[in-house]
Amino acid sequence: MASDKSVYEKIVFVTGNPGKFTEIQEILAAVSITAIQNKGDYPEIQADDLEPIAAASAKAAAEDLQIPVLVDDSGIFIRALNGFPGPYSRFVEDHLGNPRVLKLMENETDRSACFKTVVAFCEPGRSPVTFTGTVEGKIAFEERGNGGFGFDPIFDYNGKTFGELGSEFKNTISHRRRALDKFIEWVKKQ
Ligand code: ITT
């Protein structure tokens, strides 16, 4: 891996999702890493898990841009729906939205769900490295709260949704925070 530590002081984060970027930027700023957004839209491979998707996206972006990059592939996995939407979360958010997800869950008593983030870092000419974080919660019965983005208003964490808790609290315990903590630990060892 790179011996030049400055590679990790400013990192280009490839995402078109402003909610994700804001969270990543805040989490990394706390450890003096500056995240710079690149909105490049790279085709995502299809897979049942987020790890290979994040790794392939990071590799494609690093080779295209010829700079080290970070990407984040995330999803919500609902137990009563056998893990759906998981890697298809973006499609579900765009085409169904939270109200239709709640409708699918209408008669389900097992409300358990987890959010998962895989952060992948890749330098041109090298293999990507991935870091995974999860957080357990429940699917609420209705949307609550205006904070966060995406599925946050329907993800209940100990009685309040991520939408109600807001990003400052979310960033202390979220799937994304947990994945980035692993990335930060790895950076310290480089
Ligand atoms: P990029 O690939 O450009 O980064 P995306 O929005 O397509 O952006 P993902 O595929 O990782 O990103 O996200 C899957 C879906 O899950 C998408 O609809 C997100 O809005 C949603 N999502 C991701 N992280 C979330 C979080 O922390 N809270 C709520 N929803 C989230």
Image (cartoon, rainbow, N blue to C red):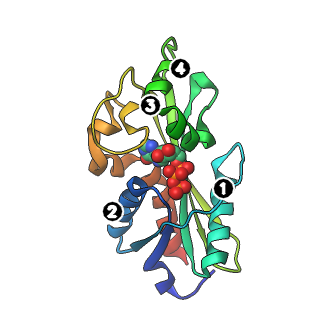
User: Mark 2 or mark 3, which is nearer the start of the sequence?
Assistant: 2
Which numbered disc covers residue 104? 4
User: Mark 3 or mark 1, which is nearer the start of the sequence?
Assistant: 1
Say which amino acid is labelled 4: Leu
Question: Could you say where residue 138 lies in the image, as x and y percent from the top left?
Answer: 44, 27
Task: Work out how far the residue at label 4 is from the one at label 1, CA to CA, in angstroms.
Answer: 26 Å
Question: Could you say where residue 1 lies in the image, as x and y percent from the top left?
Answer: 63, 80
Dividing the picture into quadrants, the one containing residue 129 is bottom right
Task: Work out how far the residue at label 1 is from the one at label 2, CA to CA, in angstroms.
Answer: 25 Å
Task: Work out how far the residue at label 4 is from the one at label 3, CA to CA, in angstroms.
Answer: 10 Å
User: Mark 1 or mark 4, which is nearer the start of the sequence?
Assistant: 1
User: Mark 4 or mark 2, which is nearer the start of the sequence?
Assistant: 2
Task: Work out how far the residue at label 1 is from the one at label 3, CA to CA, in angstroms.
Answer: 23 Å
Residue drawn 65% across the image and 53% down it: 51
Q: Is residue 133 visible in this depiction of the protein?
A: no
Say which amino acid is labelled 1: Glu
Which numbered disc covers residue 26? 2
Question: Could you say where residue 38 lies in the image, as x and y percent from the top left?
Answer: 48, 70
Q: Nearer the viewer, mark 3 or mark 2?
A: 3
SS assignment at label 1: loop
How crowded pointer 1 is (Cα within 10 Å; few <14, some 14-19, many 20+) is rated as some
Whether residue 184 is situated above or below residue 23 in the rendered picture: below
Task: Work out how far the residue at label 3 is from the one at label 2, CA to CA, in angstroms.
Answer: 26 Å
Residue occupied by mark 3: 98
Task: Tell me whether circle 4 and circle 1 mark residues in contact (CB < 8 Å).
Answer: no
Residue occupied by mark 1: 44
User: Mark 3 or mark 4, which is nearer the start of the sequence?
Assistant: 3
Q: Is mark 2 within 8 Å of ligand 1?
A: no
